Amino acid sequence: MVGRAEMGRCWLDRGVSRADLQKDPRDVAAMFDDVAARYDVTNDVLSMGQTIRWRKAVTRALEPLAGATVLDLAAGTGTSSRPLMAQDAVVVSCDFSIGMLRQGMTQYPDQMFVAGDALALPFADDTFDAVTISFGLRNITDPAAGLREMARVTRPGGSLVVCEFSTPTWGPFRTAYLEYLMRALPEVAERMSSNPEAYVYLAESIRAWPDQRGLADLIAHNGWSDVRYRNLSGGIVALHRAAVPGP
């Protein structure tokens, strides 16, 4: 099993506070470093408390057995790993933002944190029974390559759960949601976050992201089979499930 001392590749560039949609890894890592201290509380406010519901949905979708090994990728401070650990899964919380990992180690000293680049994970083939990534696939420079790397470290028959922002299914709600993203979200972030520019990037990256069917196709073409999805919160978020083909 991987220990905290086995730290994978990471990027640091304290001179950059906002990423653009080209998603330079150094920019994205620095942006998350900047918001680490207030990241969890800001997200709870901006989502109107929905983050707790979404984490529970991920845990139900994975249905981890006691002792199952789970990689929680783009785990940030590790809050997303807590419901999985409550099911007695052996969870590795992996992220490439050192600021987020440091914050997580302070908050959760009982948790296993590893720094790692999603495009070159510091784990052997077939290491995990399952991989999950919540609100992080969108930030990977090459999401298709990231999905293939996740499949590499997952055993045959193992599962994937992706929780990611998506496209609301009802037209009027979709219009109101996009208005919130581009206007209200940055204004709230201005009051809540140490780096409101990060939340401008958040809004822009959500608008540029594929819809539910588009993400399902991306997953299916990059190492995973039996891809299914369901909407949460009216399609603001979609939960995609898949599996590594068995032997």
Image: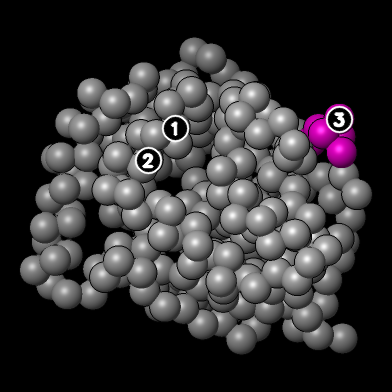
Label 3, residues with CA under 10 Å away: few <14, some 14-19, many ≥20: few
Q: Is residue 38 left or right of residue 64?
A: left
Quadrant in the rendering for residue 212 = bottom left
Residue placed under numbered mark 1 in the picture: 39
Q: Name the residue located 14 percent from the left edge and 66 percent from the top edge.
A: 173
Q: Is residue 31 left or right of residue 143?
A: left
> Is residue 154 something one can see in this rendering?
no
Q: Position of residue 45 (x, y in %)?
A: 30, 40
| Earlier residue among tags 2 and 3 | 3
Q: Name the residue located 27 percent from the left edge and 48 percent from the top edge.
A: 48
Asked whether the beta carbons under mark 2 and mark 3 sit within 8 Å of each other, the answer is no
Q: Name the residue located 37 percent from the left edge and 40 percent from the top edge.
A: 43
Label 2, residues with CA under 10 Å away: few <14, some 14-19, many ≥20: some
Three-letter code for the amino acid on which mark 3 is drawn: Ala
Extent of the magenta region = 3-8
Residue placed under numbered mark 3 in the picture: 5
Secondary structure under the numbered disc 3 in the rendered image: loop
Q: Position of residue 161 (x, y in %)?
A: 58, 68
Q: Name the residue located 69 percent from the left edge and 73 percent from the top edge.
A: 159
Image mark for residue 43: 2
Secondary structure under the numbered disc 1 in the rendered image: helix
Which colour style is shown? one colour
